[in-house]
Image (cartoon, rainbow, N blue to C red):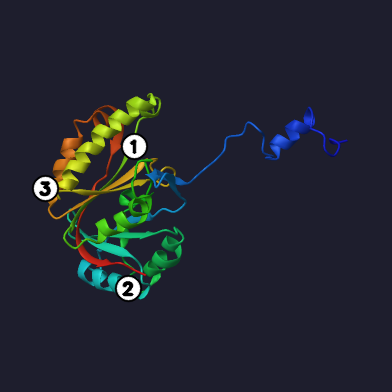
Amino acid sequence: MGARAGSLPHGDDRAKLAAMGTPQSDAPQIDVRERGAERDGQRQTMDRRLFMQLLVFDATGQLGASEATRNLTAALERRRAAAVLYADVNNPAGLGLLTWSEDPGDFVSRVRPVFAEQEIRGLRLRHELTMLGRTYSTGYEPDLEHWLLERPRQTALNEAWPWAVWYPLRRGGAFERLPPKERSDIMREHAGIGKAYGAADLAHDIRLACHGLDAHDNEFVIGLIGKELHPLSHVVQAMRRTRQTSEFIVQMGPFFVGHVLWRNAGS
């Protein structure tokens, strides 16, 4: 017989309960909320974040880049989808589509149906350039909601910043085994360079985590946005000498370089 009412399970009963997923006292406590700095004496927490996806296409064949741009923007406007459409600088027939939503289901219900429309068919997806990630916090953000939800939108939609470089990256496992303070120092060096470029209005970043969301096991997606292309290349070059990049990043890219053709804030 099983354990009596009010008694603790023993032996085989404990094993059976564990196999059934019954919570145990030593089980880890899972908390998926984002955390920011303290505000008014309270630590900021929020269980909201923005998902962003980049899809890159070849507009070859009967549907050329110009017609594809017209048809694609019209279809996205009808669905009131938040999006930026880029010309692929390295491919005369290429287009890059950046979309975002707090609800990742919108990529399936709002964006995906666009490519089933007759006037959109003919675009060839370049799978190697697909990127998907989510905004995340580091625990130090003074305004958590702005960082997670508003800043990425504003950066992507800013009409003064038409250039973009998007790329995924993956760090080696050795980084995660470093002592916390050493990891923090490495990240502070890296972040300091990014902040300096942003303060000078040379390059502004969108940083996304993509653990488990990327076909090639990348950890992060980075978007560098700005008014000119050269500083975006320059900041990538400057980051090469940081300890994080030189010692712990094992894969960067492929890189997508785009220039804005159209923007829509969506609904």
Residue 192, by quadrant, is top left
Query: How many other residues sit within 10 Å of disc 1, few (<14), some (14-19) or many (≥20)?
Result: some
Callout 1, which amino acid? Arg
Q: Earlier in the sequence, mark 3 or mark 1?
A: 1
Callout 2, which amino acid? Glu
> Which residue is labeled 3 in the image?
230
> Which residue is labeled 1 in the image?
170
Q: Kindly identify the residue that appears in the image at 20 percent across and 38 percent down.
A: 193
> SS at mark 3?
helix
Q: Where does residue 251 sit, x and y in percent of width and height? A: 30, 36
Query: How many other residues sit within 10 Å of disc 2, few (<14), some (14-19) or many (≥20)?
Result: some
Q: On screen, 217 above or below 224? A: above
Q: Where does residue 203 sit, x and y in percent of width and height? A: 18, 48
Residue 177 versus residue 198: which sits nearer the camera? 198
Q: Where does residue 94 sit, x and y in percent of width and height? A: 23, 59
Q: CA distance from mark 3 to mark 1?
A: 24 Å
Q: CA distance from mark 2 to mark 1?
A: 35 Å
Q: Earlier in the sequence, mark 2 or mark 1?
A: 2
> SS at mark 2?
helix
Of all residues, the one furthest to the front in this rendering is: 40
Q: Where does residue 201 sit, x and y in percent of width and height? A: 15, 50
Quick check: can you spot residue 239? Answer: yes
Residue 107 in the figure: left or right of residue 196: right
> Which residue is labeled 2 in the image?
77
Quick check: can you spot residue 210? Answer: no
Residue 119 versus residue 261: which sits nearer the camera? 261
Q: CA distance from mark 3 to mark 2?
A: 31 Å
In the picture, which quadrant includes the C terminus?
Answer: bottom left
Circles 3 and 1: CB atoms closer than 8 Å = no
Q: Kindly identify the residue that appears in the image at 41 percent across and 53 percent down.
A: 49
Q: Earlier in the sequence, mark 3 or mark 2?
A: 2
> SS at mark 1?
strand
